[in-house]
Image (cartoon, helix red, strand yellow):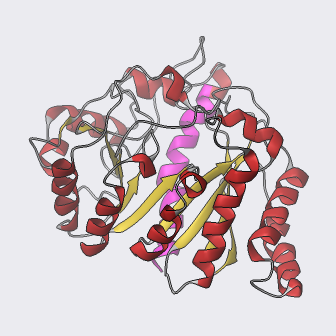
Amino acid sequence: MSILLRRIHIELTNVCNFKCQFCPDAVMERKRGKMELHLLRKILNEISHFPKSPTVLFHVLGEPLLYPHVFEAISLAVELGLNLELITNGSTLHLFPKNIQQLINSGIPKVTISLQTPDKDTFNLRGATKNLKAKQYFDGILRFTRDNILSDSNTIVQIKFMDSTPRFYSLPYKAIKVISGKEQIRKQLSDWTVKILKDVVPDSQISEIIDMEFARIKTGLPQVFHIHSKVSLYSFPLDNWGNLNLDKIYQAKFGYCDGASGQLAVLFNGTVVPCCTDYEGLIPLGDSNDKSFMQILNEPHAIELRNGFNSFKVQHPLCKKCLGANTIFKSIIRQFGSIVYYKVIKPMRNQRVSS
């Protein structure tokens, strides 16, 4: 069968300077490290020869801007014409201010900042180091975003907000409250829109943007709001990291995922896994140090995983847990929902984007 990878996650490092309460970093058992530069070059060069280039995301676990060769990595990806997105917690924009201009000058197509906790109270959930206060964190993000708007850069900045509104069909990794309900989401998005665009565009235009974009807010669903040609705000539901914390779970027997067919993740040591949820490397498909992606995807383990999903059968224990739930009814909903999402909703979204 033909394999069309749309996303490849590359973990430059799994070292992070935050200990977020909503992230499994604190319980990860995998050793810490960083990707060898020669391996990264090999991976990026291989991706550049794909018939259709996927989106390359510098992201699994860890903070990519702590990687010592990050700007060399960005430069290589840009030179190769890759559709690169870097996902950062944004902390180094204050801690290492030179990163701001380097990112703006790098030519990177997209930077996503996982702001997640948009005010002083919720910032306490980040487990940040003592040398980074909430105001400093927010100021660094605002400076980068505003400087990028005013520059000649073509870089798109996306700022991610966490929607912790309870969802019937999914229990979060941890029961925490960040932003819940339409009104709270609208207020935070509006406040940040003003902070970003103040003195950049007229106040009347800011009001129009807020009225137009945030009138369609929905809770429990990923939503992107375009507030400027170079800036979007992204409201995303609190993740459950594959039902990591559920002691009792009704495992999925059927369902669908595009792991190993539409997406892959490469851990810092070169291990290839089906998706970024497999942050422990429990489903190793192969080693990118020794083999190409196509060789790895045609290994028996990857073929078995793909064939299972293509017949709507969930085979690996990690996948069964990820697509399951804490009640039989929710588990069935999630299993059917995975098929509808990947076979109906996502193709429609991709078609809209490509057109």
Q: Position of residue 268 (x, y in %)?
A: 29, 39
Coordinates of residue 345 in the picture (x, y in percent): 55, 57
Q: Is residue 18 above or below residue 202?
A: above
The quadrant where residue 148 appears: bottom right
Q: Is residue 198 left or right of residue 299?
A: right
Q: Considering depth in this image, is 207 or 166 the residue closer to the camera?
A: 207
Q: Nearer the viewer, residue 337 or 350?
A: 350
Reply yes or no: does residue 351 show up in magenta.
Answer: yes
Is there any visible trace of residue 34 in the rendered image? yes
Residue beneath the point at 74% across and 35% down: 124
- Compared with 83, 203 (above or below) is below
Q: Which residues are magenta?
A: 331-355
Residue 224 shows up from this direction: no
Identify whether 17 is placed above or below 314. Answer: below
Please name the residue shown 40% across and 55% down the image.
57
Q: Residue at x 36, y 43 (%)?
A: 259
- Total marks drawn? 0
Q: Choose top left, top right, bottom left or bottom right for residue 143.
A: bottom right
Coordinates of residue 146 in the picture (x, y in percent): 66, 74
Q: Is residue 340 magenta?
A: yes
Say which of 82 and 245 sits in front: 82
Q: Residue lying at the far left in this picture: please name it.
A: 290
Main secondary structure of the magenta stretch: helix
Q: Residue at x 42, y 24 (%)?
A: 318
Instruction: Specify the farthest residue to the top.
Output: 247
